[in-house]
Image (cartoon, helix red, strand yellow):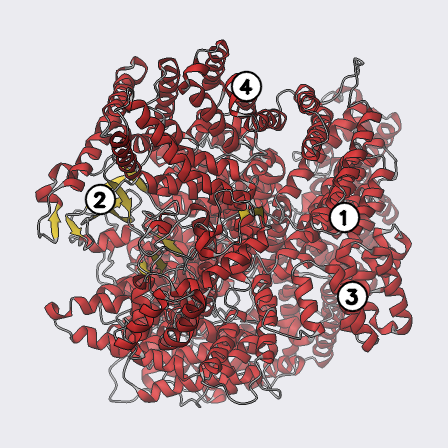
Amino acid sequence: MNQTADSIDSSHWRTTLQMLVSTLIVPDELQWKSIGRKDTTSYMQRILDKIMSRWARGLHHSSSSARATLAENVASLATHLKPFSRKQSSQLRVAAVLLLPLNRIVEGPLTEVDVHVRRQALSAFRTVIREHPADIQSDEPPPVFDFLQRGFNDKERSVRVDAGRALSDLVHLHARASNRGCKSNETIFIKINGLLESSAKDAVKETLLITIGSIGRDAHFELLGLVVHCLISQLGQDNYVLKGLAYTQLLEIAKAQMKSPYTLVSPYLSQVATFVVSRKCTNPALILETCRFLSVHPTDFISVTLSKTLPFLFANSEAKVIEEISEDVGETISSLFMMHSHQILAHVFQQQGPAQTTGSLTFIRNIISRGAEPKRDTLSIKGMVQSCVVALLADLVVILGHENEERASLAVDALRKVQRSMTSETELELSAFLRTYMLGIVSNLNELLQDVHGKKSFPAKKQILRGLEVLIVQIGPPINEVSPQIMATLQTMFLVPELAEVTLSTWYTFLSTLNIEDVIPHIGTTSAAIVSAWSILSPSTQESAKKCLRYVVFDVGSTVRNDSKAYLDEVVDLGHIPELSEMHTQLQSVRIWDPRAQLQKILDRCSSNNITVAQVALAELQNFMKNKQASFIQNLAAGDTFDPLIGSIQLTLLQVVTRDGEGSDTLRRLAFECMGILGAVDPDRCDLKSPDTKMIVRNNFEDDTEAKSFALHVIQDVLVDAFRSTSDIKYQGHLAYTIQELLKLCDFTTDLVSSDNSTKPVSAWVRNRWNGFPKHVLETVTPLMGGKFKASHKEFPPLPSPIYPHQKTYREWVQLWTAHLITKASKGMAQQIFGVFRSAVRNKDVGVAHHILPHLVLNILASENDEDTNGIIQELTAVLEDQVASDSPSTPDKKFLSAQAVFTLLDHLSAYVRVQRQDLPKKAEGRRSRGNSEFVIRQQQLIRVDSVLSSIDHELMAKAALQCRAHARSLMNFEKQIVSMRERQPPPPGTDFTPYYERLHEIYAQLDQPDGMEGISTLILSPSLEHQIRQHESTGRWTAAQSCWEVRLQQQPDNLDFHLGLLRCLRNLGHYDTLRTHVQGVLVRNPGWQSVLADFQVESAWMIGAWDDVHNITANTEHEGPSVVKARVLLAMRSGERIQIEDGLRMARLVLGAPIAASGPSGYHRAYDAVVDLHMIHELELIHEAVSNLPPSSQGRKSAIVTLSQILSARLDRTLPTFRVHESLLSMRRTAFSLSTVSRPSITSQIGQSWLASAKIARKAGQWQTAYSAMLQAQYTNARFSFMESGKLVRARGEPLRALQELENSMRILGFVDNNTIDLTKEDDQSKRMKAKAQILLARWMNESDRYEASYVLKQFQNAADSAPGWESAFYHLGHFQDQCYRNLSTDDKSSRGIKMNFQTIKCFTEAAAYGNKFVYQTIPRLLTLWLDIGERKVSAENPLFDRINSVVASSIDSIPVYKWFTAFPQIVSRIGHLNRIVYSVLSKLISLVIREYPNQALWFFASVVNSTKPNRQQRGGAILDQLKSNPANTDSNFPELITSLHAMIDELLRLCNYPIGDRKLLSMRRDFPKLLGMKESNILIPLQSSLTVNLPPVSSMSHRDKRHNLFDPMSPTFAVFYDEIEIMHSLAKPRKFTVNGSDGIKYMFLAKPKDDLRKDARLMDFNGIINKLLKTNSESRRRQLHIRTYGVVALNEECGVIQWVPNTIPVRPVLLKYYETRNIPAWMQSKELNDVTRRIKDGSDKDAAELFVTKILPEFPPVFHEWFVETFPEPSVWLASRLNYGRTMAVMSMVGFILGLGDRHCENILLDNNNGDVVHVDFSCLFEKGRTLDTPERVPFRLTQNLVDGLGVTGIEGVFRIACEITMQLLRDNKDPLMSVLDAFIHDPLVEWEDETRKKQRERRHAKDKDKDSAAIKAADLRLWAKSAVRPIERKLKGLYSPTNVKERTYGGITRGGEDEREISTSNLVQMLIQEAIDPANLGKMYPGWAAWH
């Protein structure tokens, strides 16, 4: 009202108002002063009341001039009162008041009401309705048409025209009204039609028609319909002028609306057709003229509109018209009725009153019966309704949503009439009746909304949705049975803005109608849909949305039980929407998540099949990683092994980007952005293995249980996903039918979910399987259990064979072939299962067909039908031949996708062959007892399938696989060819393997396997340039590759590919100036290459800052390559335009991420470069945002840049550590920082640090020139501490002394060396740390140079520690130097000066361990050894310093986190017998602390102490546990109970080990060990190696300070069940094999071993565990996934223990024997001749032995091991992976075995994993070079016999094996100290066998001398000496000390005891020597025959 008040305050406005009103109410007067104006509304109401009272009477002056003036005054007053339109004040009705005087003006004689007056009145009328439209649009508009009708009837044309214009204004005004405008216009047009049909003059009708035409030219939907209907109704006029005018107006309207006549009329065809056709008999001209206008034949018009006209005609009993129509269209009346029965009956049932409906139904029955055959039964009303009941009910439900309540109520009555006609149950509720048909009704409504039966207007769709809402209310909670269909409808319609509000209303009704438990499945979808669309919803729609969400969060939340509130986890994040803050707060109070749980919930939602849920979840994930929990994500992606959640994030995102279908583009964009935020995480540090959901049916659907399991698998893993993700309602129906039938097949009924007590009992199997479904599956399939879906199947026409060539697309082929094969499935269960897929496989989505095709093919092949088998072979061959055919007509997409489908199918068949080969031997063992019929059947099926696989040509397969990038398959088939050619004796003449080797080299390059390439290269004597280029590029030798490309360009200077190769090298080397010059030169000669070279050209331009060139290149190219889109982003950021930047980033992500989507979920390695690009784009955004928003203060800017630097550093650390990746990221960062227009020191510093980082990675990669260039750039930017990198570069290039000199000089200049001045300036922590690093570097180099006094070097180390207090590295290096000095002391000095050094070392190491965990394996074991050794030496223990040492260790127990002590727990436990009481008191405290903190793991390690055969150890162990149990701090927990129960189990396991066996082959747990059997469901941890292995936090993480760090996997399994059967093994000690079930549901097996000191095995597992950790820290070993297979070992005491059985393994020996048996080669050298040969070898010289072994023995046993890989792993990708695993695990264990002196590696002690090819070593009894002491000494360092080499493939020992050996050996040598610390336990807890040897020597000594006074002391000293002598050679090997003397004169492996010729050998040379020794024929020939060197 402010506008009105301001107006009234104006005196001019007030004066004018008074004048106008006074003139209007003459002769009356208004007392203006008396009415006041405080209350504006009442002020105006008084004025309007006065006007109304005045004009209740007639005119005061009736002259024409007075009337005209009065009309003008009315218009003026209407304009003046515009502020008081009803838009501002709903209480005033100005227009209604002002129309009163206008009516008076036009009343009177024509002499007074002349033309001018009449026109003036109409003009004033138009002004009134224009200025006060709200009055006209109100619920009670004034009766204005009567006023206008007077004008239309005027004899003056000008008046009629004015009246027409007024009418046009009026109807357009109504049309703009949002509520009752349409109804008002309908009323007006009814009156207009009445005028046109009346006897009014033709001139009047003419004016009306012209007016209506003008209205139609700019009318919209509803109004246009009224106009069109009105004009068409006049086409039947007898007056040709009016008819022609109507026709002309229609044409003009069509032209103005830019539509054809038919398009103009089609939206209103229902009303028009009914009107026209119903008058067919009475006014035939009407239909003819209408059809002429529409340009259609009358018959066609009638046919097309039958569904619209027949309902009206049948309902109104228009028999004559119906008969004519029947004749016209050539259909009987009964046929017409049956085709449109539901529309006709819907109309009939809507008639008011039962009489009309009954009459129409009677008419229908009579007219149909009249033409029916005499013999047919009389048609009943029920029969008529029954024939179309679903469609009829759907039509009536649509009417339920009509805006007109009368029409809607008629529909309700109509539904009741339908119900009465269908059922005799008068008491049946309408809801129960509708429930029966609700699925069909909802499906019909869906089809209408999806425009399946023709396009529907938005008003029509709104009506349908309102009808659905009423239906939901009518049916009530049982509507849940069709909830999937309703939710699919609501989600689809909600995306249409015009339908959003009415959809939300229906949505709310749906949710509030359901029972609470039925609402829960829809919560996530509902909230996601609302949140995703929130920004585009109108205010009113937002209110409706809030209502829905409020119901979900508040109403449902307050109803469910507290333990059910987990459903609120499904509600998406509402925090970013201010209007939803109340609900967000409520949610936060209910779901209290830690970041890990929250992230997991988000990831679960990202994987949702629902596009909207996934989209919102991805937005949440983006916000979570970028803003909310950036530091949390940073900690997860740190260290040598990333948190499993990182792998989960990447897998989820990879699965998202590979999704197809509607909305996938938005998902991809969000996923690409999330990938960029996460960064290009190193694939070797995170687990990216997606769970395998494949299933192989082994019994060909002849086993009911397995067949039902397959049905469950298909439902869960295929059908539900497809059902939930599709928006195609028809396809959803097909899927619903398939699911419904499979549920029935699995015996799932509604009894499973019914709460009714009358339900039938459900079997345990069925219920367990049902409960095994995930939540989302249960939510989807539950409503379908009682479904009534049906499917009709047509007969298949004959198809050509093969089908493939006759189909244009992959989709057509795979769907048709699958559908065809379904008809061929074997009878019985297979046909039942596959038969229900017929409709589901023929759709746009090929997913279902693609999934079931392999199962179908396997079923048909396993069945005995040669014709079908041949058909399948033909089909497969056709696809493969098409791949290699040069003239193939197929599209690339069809070829590629079809080949992938075939390879997937073949992999499935191969997997079947593999599992059957594994299973059949087990079945064969029991076939005698059960009969062998099943075994024979399965064997025959296996043979049939295997024969099909074998029948496919290997060369064709290899070429086809190479063509479509199935590289593993191609490699496998090419290798088979090579092996086959090699085995021919002799090879065919002229055989040249080089082309095959080149193919293999190319394949390995494509597989990104440089080791394989290296191996192949050794086989090629003269490699081609192309070969050399591949080799150099794969290994990162870009300079060498550049030289090769330059040579090729000299040969072919105009070859584009050669230029691109050279440019790649230059880019990877960072030589951008050269690159730019080369591109410019090439483009001068070949300007047509512009688009191809644009990426290189633009990248080189931005790298040197040529931004004008960048702009020109991006503007002039249509090429959207990676560098071009990056350049556009850089240009946008340089311009600073926000919108341009956002668009650039969005486009860049879509372009750069495309290769990731193409690579598939398992293609992360292949698409890694694209992920790096996304990483880069995000960093551009980060840097731009940070630099653009720097704080004004210098301190603030510095802080912001430091924060950014830390983020960027962490992001770089998590990427693949290669030069190419790091340099590309660093160079882009420099470019991003240089975009800043303002030069700031902090930014310049960042650029300098980036150059330093580039120099470092180039140095490490051996790129000296690149490193030097980067170094110069860093120095140019004055990068701090650049002198350190400069020195390292000089040193790396082989000048250590110059490097030391430069480093020292630089540090002197900076005052870091010998600086005695006090620095009062304040340094930040980073500067202190860098200064300390420089000092440590200087000290280390000084120490290594041997040119400085130790005291001076020590001072430098001390300075570093002083410079950076709290830094782990400084204290470690200081302590390490002290320890090194101690080791170099003489024996005398050690006893005197040594203790001081030990004290300093221990002190430094405790500090280091407290500050970090980088050196924890170096510091903790060493400080323990020093401390405990000092305590054992009597002289040292009496030194005063020893008390200080004890004090330091005692205090460190509290300061160092417990988990760090745990890393050395075996070592700590081994010293429990320590003789020094003071030391023991501290030691026992430490042991107690570790056990208390980690009881589940530590108690297993402690078992051998508590049950020791040595009294002292046993007594001390028991005392520690007793003290822990009795400690008051522990009594409240379950800790004492855990100790008791665990040791009760250990006692039982001891009893099991020592139990007398006799001749028994089995023991019973129930009978013999009932107490152990009763220990099920305990909290005791199963002692698996993985459960006992420590998990240190990342070095970069600060969580090392957390004393309660989660050291172990919280999901480690505990004992759940002990199996009854205990198997006695056949070996001498008769170990007992028992089985347990873990709490994780997995079965574990163990061996209880008597008479075996397993402490050796346990420590070896610890040793191997540390090696595994070291292998993970090294990027090269990590990339190759080098590891040792370990297993759990628990020593129960010194004589027995428990060892984990390694499942799925088989010894090498039976594998080889099997293949030799197939070749009829005896397993053993049984002939006398061969025995003579072995005797001669034993007695002969090395030369003779070698010759005999090679010529006489090896030819008898050709290598066969490669066959095991082909047979066991027939799927190519698995074959390749398993062979790589084999080669690498064998290499690692060969090197470790050599270091440890591991012997007795015969073929029973080396196992093979059937699942992945890993090599697993067992039986470590022959350690520490014991093999050298055997009767026949072992002469090889490890087993590398011909068969083991054969298993490595074509390359043999080269490549994979050799490189893995070298990496492992180098790693072992680099980490000598931590490895030796593990072996320290052997010295202080010696093995039983060593004790026996010591006793033997003591006896010998006692015989030789008098009895010693202190035999115990001698024994201890002897034991330790023996242990040290056993361990010392290991230390020498780790140093690389090697003596290449004659084998007979050296110890095992060439490692001397300190001979004169020993020297340190390089790693590669050492590996070569060891391999040579291992394969040396003389060494192999001299081995013990039982070792089987020929195997």
Q: Along the horizontal axis of the image, is 549 left or right of 751?
A: right
Instruction: Residue type at mark 1: give it.
Output: Met
Q: Quadrant of residue 396?
A: bottom left
The answer to which of marks 3 and 2 sits earlier in the sequence is 3
Circle 4 residue: 1403
Q: Along the horizontal axis of the image, is 18 left or right of 350?
A: right
- Label 3: few (<14), some (14–19) or many (≥20) C-alpha neighbours in 10 Å: some
Circle 2 residue: 1648
Q: Which one is closest to the eye, mark 2 or mark 4?
A: 4
Q: Position of residue 1818 (x, y in %)?
A: 33, 51
Labelled pair 1, 2 in contact (Cβ < 8 Å) = no
Instruction: Residue type at mark 2: give it.
Output: Ala
Mark pair 3, 2: CA separation? 63 Å
Circle 1 residue: 1228
Quarter of the C terminus within the rendering: bottom left
Residue 154 visible (yes or no):
no
Labelled pair 2, 4 in contact (Cβ < 8 Å) = no
The kind of secondary structure element at disc 3 is helix
Q: Along the horizontal axis of the image, is 1059 left or right of 629?
A: right
Q: Which one is closest to the eye, mark 1 or mark 2?
A: 2
The answer to which of marks 1 and 2 sits earlier in the sequence is 1
